[in-house]
Image: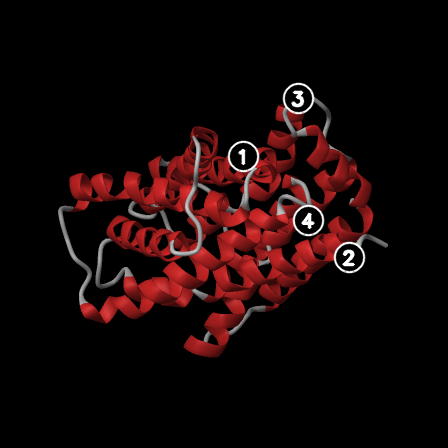
């Protein structure tokens, strides 16, 4: 059906989406005690510091590519945080989920070709699943919604940047460069917006879980996986994150899925099945198409 290398990459993305989703309840609790941008700054600093013990980025090229990836990632977190101050959590989750739909078109734009039909179908189905899971009942395009839309574009751009540049560098050093850029951008922004703050001891457990597990571990998995599969495949598989988040909230917080939520989780699973079974050749072509000419 598809190569063992591609299977491992899909599995790595599923693990990353599980951890991203599972840490939702951790972050939700932490940001009640520390401002969001401050939490992001310390989280990414911790992840970068730990990974730098394994390998350091060397050369201008890896730092330039890491800067572009880190800038897109930082923009996504910043827009999402700012948007949540003036829009509902459901609207934010729904609009941010548009990155699943945006990615195949953005990847096709950079590759100068039309997106494949399976890419479009799987992305649309995954987005429909996100709508059902979040239970959003409408979008009012206010300031917060527009900021959330900017977040979706930023996360999509991050995936496309990884698909274009990650294959040119060792995984760990490239991840260090990306996380370092996010931290260096987040600290001065947090200082200006939220004021200087050292997280209290009660938050350091959440920082360790998200900094080591999500920021360091999961981005290593994502970056490696995107050296094997294309941006569209990564976006659709990572769309499993809301389903994992809901499942974690069910177990940890006692929340329950509605029938629509179960339907949404099923839609995302079907979308992943389609992208890994029907899009094999397309994904490899996409990965080759976004590699810059020498």
At a point 50% along the width and 48% down the height, the residue shown is 94
SS category of the residue bearing label 2: helix
Q: Toward which corner of the image does residue 254 lie, by quadrant? A: bottom left
SS category of the residue bearing label 3: loop
Q: Toward which corner of the image does residue 185 lie, by quadrant? A: top left
Left or right of 207, for residue 153? right
Q: Give the CA distance from mark 1 to mark 2.
A: 24 Å
Q: Nearer the viewer, mark 4 or mark 3?
A: 3
Label 2 sits on residue: 4
Packing grade of label 3 (10 A; few <14, some 14-19, many >=20) is few
Q: Give the CA distance from mark 4 to mark 3.
A: 33 Å
Label 4 sits on residue: 125
At a point 50% along the width and 63% down the height, the residue shown is 19
Q: Give the CA distance from mark 4 to mark 2.
A: 26 Å
Label 1 sits on residue: 161
SS category of the residue bearing label 4: helix
């Amino acid at each position: 059906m598809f190569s063992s290398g591609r299977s491992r990459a899909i599995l790595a993305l599923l693990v990353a989406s599980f951890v991203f989703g599972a840490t939702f309840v951790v972050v939700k609790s932490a940001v009640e005690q520390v401002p969001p941008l401050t939490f992001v700054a310390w989280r990414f600093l911790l992840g970068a510091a730990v990974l730098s013990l394994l390998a350091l980025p060397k050369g201008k090229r890896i730092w330039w590519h890491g800067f572009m990836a880190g800038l897109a990632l930082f923009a996504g977190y910043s827009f999402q945080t700012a948007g949540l101050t003036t829009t509902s959590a459901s609207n934010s989750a729904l609009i941010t989920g548009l990155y699943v739909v945006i990615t195949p078109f953005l990847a096709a734009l950079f590759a100068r070709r039309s997106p494949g039909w399976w890419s479009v179908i799987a992305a649309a189905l995954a987005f429909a699943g996100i709508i059902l899971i979040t239970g959003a009942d409408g979008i009012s395009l206010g300031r917060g919604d527009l900021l959330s839309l900017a977040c979706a574009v930023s996360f999509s751009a991050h995936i496309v940047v990884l698909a274009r540049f990650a294959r040119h560098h060792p995984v760990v050093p490239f991840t260090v460069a990306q996380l370092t850029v996010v931290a260096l951008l987040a600290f001065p922004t947090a200082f200006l917006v939220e004021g200087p703050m050292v997280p209290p001891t009660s938050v350091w457990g959440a920082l360790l879980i998200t900094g080591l597990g999500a920021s360091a571990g999961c981005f290593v998995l994502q970056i490696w996986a995107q050296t094997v599969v294309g941006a569209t495949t990564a976006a659709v598989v990572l769309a499993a994150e809301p389903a994992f988040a809901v499942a974690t909230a069910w177990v940890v917080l006692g929340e329950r899925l509605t029938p629509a939520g179960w339907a949404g989780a099923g839609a995302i699973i079907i979308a992943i099945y389609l992208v890994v079974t029907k899009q094999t050749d397309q994904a490899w072509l996409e990965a080759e198409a976004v590699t810059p000419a020498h």
